[in-house]
Amino acid sequence: MKEALKVGVSGVRGVVGDSLTPQVAVTFAQAFGTFVGRGPVIVGRDTRPTGMMIENAVVAGLESVGCKPVLAGIVPTPSLLVITSARAARGCIAITASHNPAPWNALKFVDRRGMFLDEVRAEELFDIYHQGDFPLVAEDEIPRVEVEKAAFEEHARRIAAYVDMESIRRAHFRVAVDCCNGVGALWSRRFLEESLGCRVVAVFERPTGDFEREPEPLPQNLGSLREAVRKHGCDIGFAQDPDGDRLAIVDEQGEPIGEDLTLAFAVEEVLDRHEKGPVVVNLSTSRSVEDVARSRGCEIERTKIGEINVTSRMLERRAVVGGESNGGVIVPAIHPCRDSFAGMALVLELMAATGRTVSELRAAIPRYTLIKDKIPIRTERAPLILRHLRKVYAGQRMNLIDGVYVELGRSWIHVRRSNTEPVMRLTIEAPDRREAQRLAAEVRAEVEQAARQG
């Protein structure tokens, strides 16, 4: 069955050779070039084997409408956003399907601020795409391609200007890192060793894009990292997704602590040793992050899922830290984007400043059980499923800004249609595992029942 092209605030993504083809990439690049106007446009990618083919198509599309492609190569997505802003480019196209399986790839569209397009501007771009009326230029107006070699260096410089690098270097941490055969395979060891003075053990460090584990850095996918931490006596283990914007943590005993704790640690470090201020997170974020912020007298606000929804609100509120529940740490003072490299630096800074192990830091934060699940659906069934859930939980306090979020005392459930896959995403959190599992089973049954109706 043909997999539909996913078009939305998270960009354009699909299975390569199925819904995502070079022709689609050329046309979207032409539309983006028309949207941002003539001038330099940064282009970068992750390690997926299809990346070069899609990049060639994007370059052709940009050149055809008079934009100058500036090729940053294989670099982390946050590096692309940083260099777009630093170079005052017209915009950026990041070629990466992030956590999606290997057959997928995607185009993510970035504005001149180095931020993804919001819903309104994304719709403007898609209107241009559908109209198909592009200002093609003559041969003598086609600009030459340039190469950008300093994207990661500028990114690392901003992190170094924010955190106390010397305190981290003095600690001589032994760190394991799972690069998922993605961009981290080129940049993570270098960053941890040269910038942060760590002794590094790396797994899945070949930058092939042939993922040796599932791309999402979820606990069930981190067996090799856990083994590396235990075998080599590491202080911490870090796991990235293929484009380097998400970060998960394994403690010194080789136990995964969950992506939400990545964000909780970063919030703790920013509020304790950098600056106090508002915190903004997405709707599916653990209450542990809220507990950390409120215990330090700081306000916390929740937004719709999607990096741009969080970063836009962070800038409006002048938030000092925030992020998404998938291990996406955002520090606007570095750059308003999810950033696994900033996350690694902040967590190591926290360990160096407190002298605590990861498990000790974890023990100091209120404990919850958070369960994430997803159910494949036909896209057109999503509204029916959400209406069904609103009826089932009609007597409870709800938030409907993004799917259905239901508060159940200290527990909560969140069900929404994915921005990146043809699935319904289920997130459930409760103070204890038994209650979380009960709620997860209950919600899954309701979603499956609604999906079968009609």
Image (cartoon, rainbow, N blue to C red):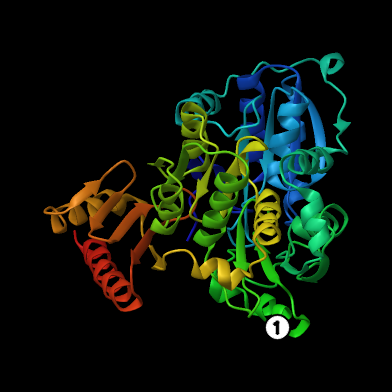
Q: Give the quadrant of the C terminus.
A: bottom left
Regarding residue 323, the answer to whether it shows in the image is: yes
Q: Which residue is mark 1?
A: 230
- Name which residue lies at 41% across and 54% down: 291
Q: Is residue 327 left or right of residue 203?
A: left
Q: Nearer the viewer, residue 419 or 359?
A: 359
Q: Quadrant of residue 425?
A: bottom left
Q: Is residue 36 above or below residue 423?
A: above
Q: Nearer the viewer, residue 440 or 24?
A: 440
Q: Quadrant of residue 413?
A: bottom left
Regarding residue 19, the answer to whether it shows in the image is: no
Q: Position of residue 136 (x, y in %)?
A: 71, 18
Q: Position of residue 319 (x, y in %)?
A: 51, 35
Q: Position of residue 87 (x, y in %)?
A: 78, 25
Q: Is residue 78 left or right of residue 279?
A: right
Q: Position of residue 25 (x, y in %)?
A: 65, 39
- Name which residue lies at 57% across and 48% down: 272
User: Tag 1, which secondary structure?
Assistant: helix
Residue type of the residue flagged with mark 1:
Arg
Q: Nearer the viewer, residue 161 or 110?
A: 161
Count of numbered tags = 1
Q: Is residue 303 left or right of residue 210?
A: left
Q: Nearer the viewer, residue 310 or 298?
A: 298
Seen as rendered, the residue at the extreme bottom is 231
